[in-house]
Image (tube, rainbow, N blue to C red):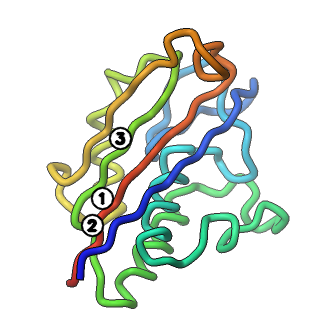
Amino acid sequence: MDRVGLGFDSHRFTPGRPLVLGGVPIDHDAGLAGHSDGDAVLHAVTDAILGALAAGDIGEHFPDSDPQWAGVDSSRFVEHAVKLAAGRGLIVGNCDVTVLAERPKLGPHKQRMRERIAALLGVDASAVSVKAKTGEGMGFVGAGEGLAALAVVSLREA
């Protein structure tokens, strides 16, 4: 049986933190505020997997009230979700990600993000899509205050 999940995350920019998106460090003047490393892309991917499993959301598995998750690499969240899926006899079929950001420009980083996400999901990079869109000057994304990410993940029987 195939299952599909949708994930979403957003964070505001904050100075003094590195920017990590899709598990890839990106040179920028600010990182993302968050309890972990703030990687909104991997948070959205994690939530998409959890959604496909009907297993709650990232905050239920990794609450920001728990100090053990402070500053942690968000790849651990994706790995956890993939293991939960495997425990139910499911593997990732594909993953589609859209990042909404006015800045930085993500074009030069999309291939590395695809490769890193694919490695975390245990799939070929051809099963992962990473797209970038701007806010066209509207809302918090358009104002450059932060960014958002959406992810859709399909799971299938192993």
Q: Viewed as shown, does residue 120 lie left or right of 100?
A: left
Q: What whole-number distance in Å separates the C-alpha atoms at marks 1 and 2?
A: 5 Å
Kind of residue sitting beneath label 3: Met
Q: Viewed as shown, does residue 123 lie left or right of 6?
A: left
Residue name at image x 60 percent, y 22 percent: 141
Kind of residue sitting beneath label 1: Ala
Q: Residue 147: horizontal and vertical position, in percent? A: 58, 30
Q: Dot 1: within a 10 Å radius of its alpha carbon, few (fewer than 14), some, or many (20 or more) residues?
A: few
Q: Viewed as shown, does residue 86 lie left or right of 29?
A: left
Contact between labelled residues 2 and 1, with CB atoms less than 8 Å apart: yes
Kind of residue sitting beneath label 2: Gly
| Element type at mark 3 | helix
Quarter of the image for the C terminus: give it: bottom left
Q: What whole-number distance in Å separates the C-alpha atoms at marks 2 and 3?
A: 14 Å
Q: Residue 143: horizontal and vertical position, in percent? A: 65, 13
Q: Residue 41: horizontal and vertical position, in percent? A: 49, 45
Residue name at image x 67 percent, y 37 percent: 11
State the residue in front, 130 or 115.
130
Q: Viewed as shown, does residue 108 lie left or right of 34?
A: left
The answer to which of marks 1 and 3 sits earlier in the sequence is: 3
| Element type at mark 1 | helix
Residue ID for mark 1? 119
Q: What whole-number distance in Å separates the C-alpha atoms at marks 1 and 3?
A: 10 Å
Residue ID for mark 2? 122
